[in-house]
Image (cartoon, rainbow, N blue to C red):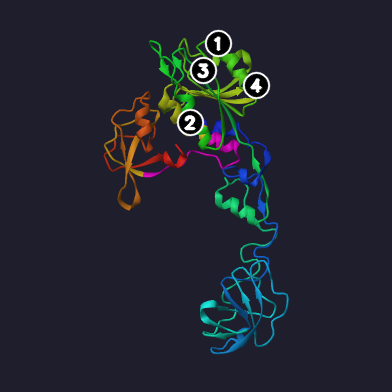
């Protein structure tokens, strides 16, 4: 059995970022930028006022002085002349600073007279002026490549005069659930049957990671049916199967896909839950075969599918982030498999959360996973440890799960 870290390294080594495509700015939220975004103009394009008031020469702005108002400069309508001695221009926020002016007299520090303005408090030179290029200048990098674009990034791109952006294509992920016992939600459940949850949960996981899920019809434990369904996934960037990954008489994914050109990279990981995991390629398409148990499938999704999607999307890819915590209960000694215990978290001292594992950790208990805040990681052969022991956890909410 492969260690989790080695298995993930091999998965990521077999993947490359997808090509770029150009999308309209309003459609770029949540996409991954494919090339550095540089400013196409300077912002602000000129010295502008940060407040409503009067533009003047600081040398003329002594307290009590009266200046002649020679024009106005609202935003978008600059004053066309040059400011002379003893003159002022009525200016508004965003208005271009007139030539010759070097100070802003705030509106509340001024008294408007007929064609004149009286200074109530002398302004300082340079104050309340936003200098040209204060935010950015033409050619400066605004957003680096490889960043998932936020609403703030979209606003910055718009300010930089970009109506279109080059982003990575969304990973298209085929999801294929196998098993004679599986029916779709809402269908009659026959004796011995179970409602399909894996494909729907994994589809939500793919969407949360910025991918496009393609949920394929459930296929029975039949080699020809599995092969036909896998052929239907052509055009996907990644094929994910659930079920049929083990070695039982009805675990047929490897045997069914072998004649279709499947090349096995590895299978079986030293982890719990999720040991029977498959990685390989089907006619050049990467294939990740997850276990059929719902908790196993989703835990493997957290550990392998999410990093794979990050690599395809052009994001930094590596182990799913973890953080320090403290165990909320005594922990038993672990065996040779890395364990991922479902746990609830509570605030702890110094901002370090306390992770309380559920008493039962069966890989079929989806309700407990849905109620968990984190996965508590137990390394292979970890000794028994008392409550309060430092541990590492993977928080689920930050992953969009």
Q: Which of marks 3 and 4 is in front?
A: 3
Residues shaded magenta: 307-324
296 displayed left or right of 122? left
In front here: 384 or 260?
260
Q: Is mark 1 on a helix, strand or loop?
A: helix
Q: How far apart are marks 3 and 2 (CA)?
A: 19 Å
Q: Which mark is residue 283?
A: 4
Residue drawn at the location 64% of the way across and 67% of the way down: 75
Q: Which of marks 3 and 2 is in front?
A: 3
Q: Residue 301 carries which label?
A: 2
Q: How far apart are marks 1 and 2 (CA)?
A: 24 Å
Q: Is mark 4 on a helix, strand or loop?
A: loop
Residue designated by label 3: 218
Q: Which of marks 3 and 4 is nearer the N terminus?
A: 3
Q: How far apart are marks 4 and 2 (CA)?
A: 22 Å
Q: What element carries label 3?
A: loop
User: Residue 329, located in which quarter of the rendered image?
Assistant: top left
User: Residue 316, located in which quarter of the rendered image?
Assistant: top right
Residue designated by label 1: 223
State if disc 4 and disc 3 touch (CB < 8 Å): no
State if disc 1 and disc 4 touch (CB < 8 Å): no
Q: Position of residue 169 (x, y in %)?
A: 64, 37
Label 3: few (<14), some (14–19) or many (≥20) C-alpha neighbours in 10 Å: many
């Amino acid at each position: 059995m492969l260690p989790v870290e080695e298995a993930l390294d091999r998965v990521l080594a077999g993947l490359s970022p997808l090509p770029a495509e150009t999308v309209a700015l309003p459609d770029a939220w949540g996409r991954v930028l494919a090339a550095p975004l540089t400013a196409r103009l300077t912002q602000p394009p000129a010295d502008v006022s940060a407040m409503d008031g009067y533009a003047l020469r600081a040398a003329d702005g002594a307290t009590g002085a009266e200046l002649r108002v020679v024009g106005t400069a609202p935003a978008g309508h600059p004053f066309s002349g040059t400011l002379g001695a003893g003159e002022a221009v009525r200016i508004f926020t965003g208005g271009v600073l007139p030539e010759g002016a070097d100070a802003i007299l705030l509106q509340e520090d001024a008294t408007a007279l007929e064609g004149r303005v009286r200074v109530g408090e002398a302004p300082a030179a340079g104050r309340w002026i936003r200098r040209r290029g204060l935010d950015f200048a033409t050619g400066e990098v605004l957003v680096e490549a490889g960043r998932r674009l936020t609403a703030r990034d979209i606003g910055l791109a718009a300010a930089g005069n970009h109506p279109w952006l080059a982003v990575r294509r969304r990973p298209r992920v085929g999801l294929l659930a196998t098993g004679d016992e599986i029916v779709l939600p809402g269908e009659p459940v026959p004796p011995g049957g179970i409602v399909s949850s894996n494909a729907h949960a994994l589809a939500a996981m793919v969407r949360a990671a910025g991918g496009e899920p393609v949920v394929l019809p459930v296929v029975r434990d039949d080699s020809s049916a599995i092969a036909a369904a896998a052929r239907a996934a052509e055009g996907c960037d990644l094929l994910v199967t659930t079920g049929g990954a083990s070695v039982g008489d009805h675990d047929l994914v490897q045997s069914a896909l072998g004649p279709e050109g499947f090349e096995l990279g590895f299978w079986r990981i030293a982890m719990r839950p999720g040991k029977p995991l498959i990685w390989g390629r089907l006619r050049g398409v990467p294939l990740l075969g997850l276990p059929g148990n719902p908790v196993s499938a989703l835990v493997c999704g957290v550990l392998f599918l999410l990093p794979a999607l990050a690599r395809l999307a052009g994001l930094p890819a590596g182990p799913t982030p973890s953080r320090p915590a403290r165990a909320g209960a005594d922990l038993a000694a672990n065996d040779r498999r890395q364990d991922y215990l479902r746990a609830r978290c509570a605030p702890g001292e110094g901002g370090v959360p306390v992770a309380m594992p559920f008493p039962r950790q069966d890989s079929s208990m989806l309700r407990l996973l849905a109620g968990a805040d984190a996965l508590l990681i137990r390394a292979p052969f970890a000794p028994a440890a008392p409550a309060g022991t430092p541990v590492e956890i993977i928080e689920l909410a930050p992953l969009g799960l």
